[in-house]
C-alpha cells in the first residue's frame, strides 16, 4: 500500500497534464474560429464598400451611357438583389463577389465605348476609389484565408485533431477568387 502513493501522484500529474492540454487545445481552436469570424466580417465590410462604390458608379455611368440600357438594368438588378451582405451565407458572399466582379468588368467595357466618360473627373475619382476598395477586399481575403489555413491545420493535424474530433470542429472553406481576378487589376482611363 505504501508504494501506491507515488503511483497515484504520477497518475494525477499525468491526468492534470492531459486536462490542461485538452483545455488549451480547445481554447486554441475556439480562438481561431473567432479570428475567422472577425476576418469574415472584414470581407463583409469590403464587400459593402464595393457595393456602395458600384451604386455611385452606376449613377455616373447612367449620365453618360443612356444607350446601354440593358447592361445598366442588369447591374441595377444585381445591386437591388443584394441588400444585406452581413446576413448572407459564406457561399452567397462568394457568389456576390463574383457577380460584382462581372458588373465591374461590364462597366469598364462601357467606359471603353464612351471616351467622354473617361474624361469625367467624378469617374476618375471613382476608379481610384475602386482600386482602393479592391486592395482592401484583397487584404481582407488574405487575412481570412490565413486564419482558415491555421484553423484547418489544427483540425487536421495530430494531436489537436483529437480535440477537434471530440468537439466536432469542421474544416472551413477558403475564400476563392475567380481565375481572372488572380491577375493584376487593369483599370484604363
Image: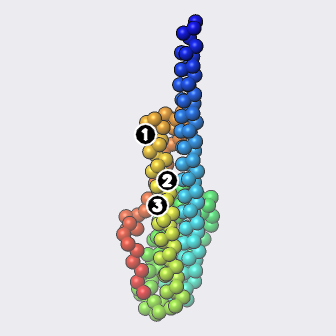
Direction from residue 41 to residue 68 in the image, left or right = left
- The residue labelled by disc 2 is 147
Q: Give x and y (percent) for residue 105.
A: 44, 75
Mark toward the start of the polypeptide (3 vs 2): 3
Residue 117 can be seen in this image: yes
Res. 30 image quadrant: top right
Q: Which mark is residue 142?
A: 3
- How many numbered marks are there? 3
Residue drawn at x 47%, y 76% as measured from the top left:
131
Res. 86 image quadrant: bottom right
Give the structural element (helix, strand or loop) at label 2.
Answer: helix
- Quadrant location, the C terminus: bottom left
Distance in Å between CA atoms under marks 1 and 3 = 22 Å
Specify few, some or many for label 2: CA neighbours under 10 Å numbering under 14, 14-19, or 20 or more: many
Mark toward the start of the polypeptide (1 vs 3): 3
Q: Is residue 12 above or below residue 159?
A: above
Res. 184 image quadrant: bottom left
Q: How is the image coloured?
A: rainbow
Q: Give x and y (percent) for residue 125.
A: 52, 85
- The residue labelled by disc 1 is 157
Viewer-nearest residue: 40 or 106 = 40
Specify few, some or many for label 1: CA neighbours under 10 Å numbering under 14, 14-19, or 20 or more: few
Residue 66 can be seen in this image: no
Specify few, some or many for label 3: CA neighbours under 10 Å numbering under 14, 14-19, or 20 or more: some
Residue drawn at x 45%, y 77% as measured from the top left:
106
Q: Which mark is residue 165?
A: none
**Mark 3 near mark 2, Cβ–Cβ under 8 Å?**
no
Amino acid at each position: 500500500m505504501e508504494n501506491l502513493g507515488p503511483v497515484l501522484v504520477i497518475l494525477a500529474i499525468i491526468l492534470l497534464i492531459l486536462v490542461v492540454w485538452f483545455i488549451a487545445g480547445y481554447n486554441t481552436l475556439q480562438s481561431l474560429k473567432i479570428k475567422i469570424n472577425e476576418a469574415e466580417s472584414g470581407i463583409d465590410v469590403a464587400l459593402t464598400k464595393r457595393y456602395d462604390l458600384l451604386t455611385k458608379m452606376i449613377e455616373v455611368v447612367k449620365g453618360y451611357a443612356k444607350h446601354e440600357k440593358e447592361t445598366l438594368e442588369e447591374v441595377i438588378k444585381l445591386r437591388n438583389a443584394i441588400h444585406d451582405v452581413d446576413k448572407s451565407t459564406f457561399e452567397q458572399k462568394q457568389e456576390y463577389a463574383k457577380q460584382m466582379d462581372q458588373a465591374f468588368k461590364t462597366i469598364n467595357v462601357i467606359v471603353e465605348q464612351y471616351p467622354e466618360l473617361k474624361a469625367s473627373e467624378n469617374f476618375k475619382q471613382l476608379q481610384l476609389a475602386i482600386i482602393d476598395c479592391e486592395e482592401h477586399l484583397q487584404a481582407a481575403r488574405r487575412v481570412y484565408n490565413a486564419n482558415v489555413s491555421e484553423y484547418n491545420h489544427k483540425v487536421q493535424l495530430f494531436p489537436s485533431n483529437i480535440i477537434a474530433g471530440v468537439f466536432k470542429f469542421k474544416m472551413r472553406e477558403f475564400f476563392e477568387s475567380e481565375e481572372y481576378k488572380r491577375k493584376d487589376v487593369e483599370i484604363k482611363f
